Amino acid sequence: MRKADKIFIDNINNILEHGVWSENARPKYKSGVTANSKYITGAFAEYDLSKGEFPITTLRPIAIKSAIKELLWIYQEQTSDLDVLENKYGVKYWSEWEVGDSGNIGLRYGATVKKHDIMGKLLDGLAKNPWNRRNIINLWQYADFEASEGLLPCAFMTMFDVRRVGDDLFLDATLTQRSNDMLVAHHINAMQYVALQMMIAKHFGWKIGKFFYFVNNLHIYDNQFDNARELLSRTPSEKNPILKLNVPDGTDFFDIKPEDFELVDYEPVKPQLTFDLAI
């Protein structure tokens, strides 16, 4: 069994069998009912991308194209305007987190990236010294939270390290996430940041190395247990899906487009499941 599917199955079983219930939960379903969850803390996974280990399950379809478009909205467009996400990229689901009738999600995500010139500083730092241990993306900015309403970032910190193996340089990445919906968002977030890692590696002409993924609070919402059991009953695909970035080494980070990515050998088990999102 592929590593990603085994980790997915193990995490679901761990949450169902050993998880504890949330208290004083913030999220609500669209009906207004409080969205309680069962959760574990301190979930960690390691994938060696250079060996074809990608953090995507085959137990259900994952919307990778939309996930990558969302990533570019944050780190290339560097805006929180929903008009850009919806009209340029065709991604609609972020409207649930619009702040009032502002047309944006507040000073969050892409707006934070732009305000602090996070991508500029990251790429400049890696160019000056790839072995510097300070190549970090940090979206957790208290001043931004105080400046406007909005959802606080879930996947909020990413760290990058370079390793030399023989004549090759490999870019490793570590994603830290404060909170993650195991059934809905886990592999979406993981693959988004693998895509970001690949974009940065291409920018410098490096190879992709290892991807480390730490989630502080990994949960399943109380209306998803039937879906969890359905996923556990499925047999993973025998194929090994791999994400490719089809641009030459040295392609500028900001010139990479969604269509440059290709997910090959991806044959997830169907049908897709439906989830009532917690907002």
Image (cartoon, helix red, strand yellow):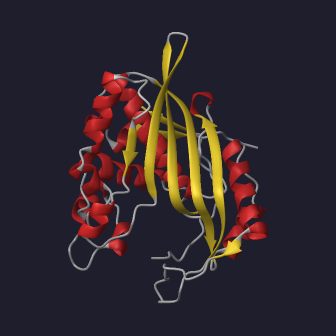
Q: Is residue 192 above or below residue 140?
A: above
Where's residue 128, x and y in %?
31, 23
Q: Is residue 182 visible?
A: no
* Residue found at x 38% / y 35%: 199
* Side (left or right) of 52 relative to 19: left
* Residue found at x 71% / y 63%: 231
Count of numbered tags: 0
Along the viewing direction, whichever of 255 and 124 lies nearer the viewer: 124
Along the viewing direction, whichever of 32 and 1 lies nearer the viewer: 32
Where's residue 245, x and y in %?
43, 33
Q: Is residue 28 above or below residue 238?
A: below
Along the viewing direction, whichever of 132 and 221 lies nearer the viewer: 132
Work out which quarter of the rendered image holds the N terminus and state it.
top right
Along the viewing direction, whichever of 1 and 163 lies nearer the viewer: 163
* Residue found at x 67% / y 71%: 227
Work out which quarter of the rendered image holds the C terminus and state it.
bottom left
**Residue positioned most to the bottom:** 32
* Residue found at x 40% / y 24%: 130
Q: Is residue 204 visible?
A: yes
Q: Is residue 89 above or below residue 271?
A: above
Where's residue 91, x and y in %?
35, 61
Where's residue 222, x and y in %?
64, 79
* Side (left or right) of 45 relative to 133: right
* Side (left or right) of 259 relative to 45: left
In the figure, residue 90 lies in which quadrant?
bottom left
